[in-house]
Amino acid sequence: MPLWMIPMSYTLVSVLGAFLFPRLEYLLNPTYQMPLAPASAQSFLATVASGMMALTGIVFSIAFVMVQFMAVAYSPRLVQWFGRDKTLYHAMGIFIATFMYSLATLVWVDRNSSGQVPFASMWLVVMLLFASMFLFARLVQRLTSLQITHVLQFIGARGRAVIHETFPHGADVAAVIEAAEEARGDLGPVTQTLRYEGTPRSIARFDIQALVRQASQADAIIVLDSAVGDTMVDDTVILRVYGARAALAERPLLKAVHLSDERTFEQDPKYPLRLLVDIAIRALSPAINDPTTAVQALDQIEDLLRRMAKCRLDAGYARDAGGRLRLVFPMPTWSDYLTLSFDEIRFYGADSVQVMRRLRSALTGLLDSVTAPSRAASVRSYLAHLDRMVEASRMDADDKAMARREDRQGLGLSRGADGG
């Protein structure tokens, strides 16, 4: 259901309830009424109705300001996650429902100069008011979660979840990589090419089981040219089919490639890293100059990379029930993840002793986690690159010596042989 339907559903239910419920109340039990003076009831209901509209305007004005703040302070790509928070839409729906039903109940107070106050409707307004206050408190709690620590923890948690869902885990990573390369081998002739037609959209995820099933039916191998997170533009090759006995139906193939207006966390371990790097380099910009935030982002980045170091990152292939290769799709290598995670932070934080120390600590920590020799070699190469960059920076000799010490806090506790 589209998110805008949530407040609309509350509005429709409240309108129907306002039309039917007071009438049923008077028909079924006309003598049972609230022991309250009509003037007091009218004053209460009018205050609730007017107050709810004012509260709605104030709350959502603040919410939109906070969204704008998040876009400027952290990353524009984070706005969608707050903007799609269902609590926001449920709060709007309850606020509207309380306003609508208060007005409807107000109409039935002292109706036809009867002096009666509807009992059940008055209590329903009170319950809606309490529900509104509860959601208001939840909404305030959501706004406080926009603090940088909570934002980084949120991204890190989503990153850990997608790593667990995307990658198979195993101890002998090197052997798996070698077996995967052998399995791909010669795929045979290209029998079909599928291209994208339409406006630019991002690949959100692949339906791997559906693609494997279609490849098995045609005794073919499907090779996806685009990866999760890629933006498809008109006439871009989506996939190629190798060795098929007959052409595969294009519609099922297209349905197996899920597109979205924006990148998502699904099947995309690069995306949480991208968001964390965005926050770090924005904090390192001259306008903000907040290297401590970059260090906090590196805490989450290191944690995600340590988890990936134990995973089979070559998981870009799938087999059918008989063990035959049916699907190949592009996946980043270990070097790709290192580049994405550290390159921009290293470049923009080259003159920050704090950032250099934290980067060295992260890379040294990764050496303890990697199991494949090729991955360890990539980390050592990156450490050497970091040393060369420190040496070429504008820092003086003392600062350069300080920057070459590893420190998980950036500036807090030196570690290593030359820590002094």
Image: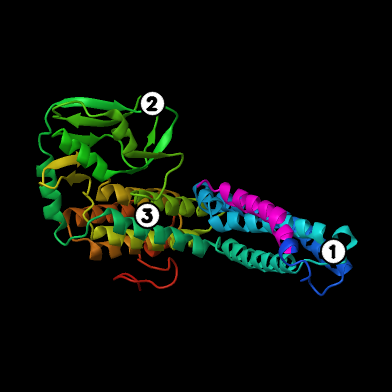
Q: Secondary structure at mark 1?
A: helix
Quadrant of residue 116 within the rendered picture: bottom right
- Residue 133: horizontal and vertical position, in percent? 67, 67
The part of the chain drawn in magenta is 1-25
Mark closest to the chain's N terminus, 3 or 1: 1
320 vs 343, nearest the viewer: 320
Q: Which residue is mark 3?
A: 390
Mark pair 1, 2: CA separation? 60 Å
State yes or no: discs 3 and 1 in contact (Cβ < 8 Å). Answer: no
Mark closest to the chain's N terminus, 1 or 2: 1
Mark 3 surroundings within 10 Å by alpha-carbon count, few (fewer than 14), some (14 through 19), many (20 or more): many
| Residue 197: mark | 2
- Residue 358: horizontal and vertical position, in percent? 39, 63
User: In this image, 244 relative to 125: left or right?
Assistant: left
Labels 3, 2: front one: 2
Q: Which residue is mark 1?
A: 42
Mark 1 surroundings within 10 Å by alpha-carbon count, few (fewer than 14), some (14 through 19), many (20 or more): many
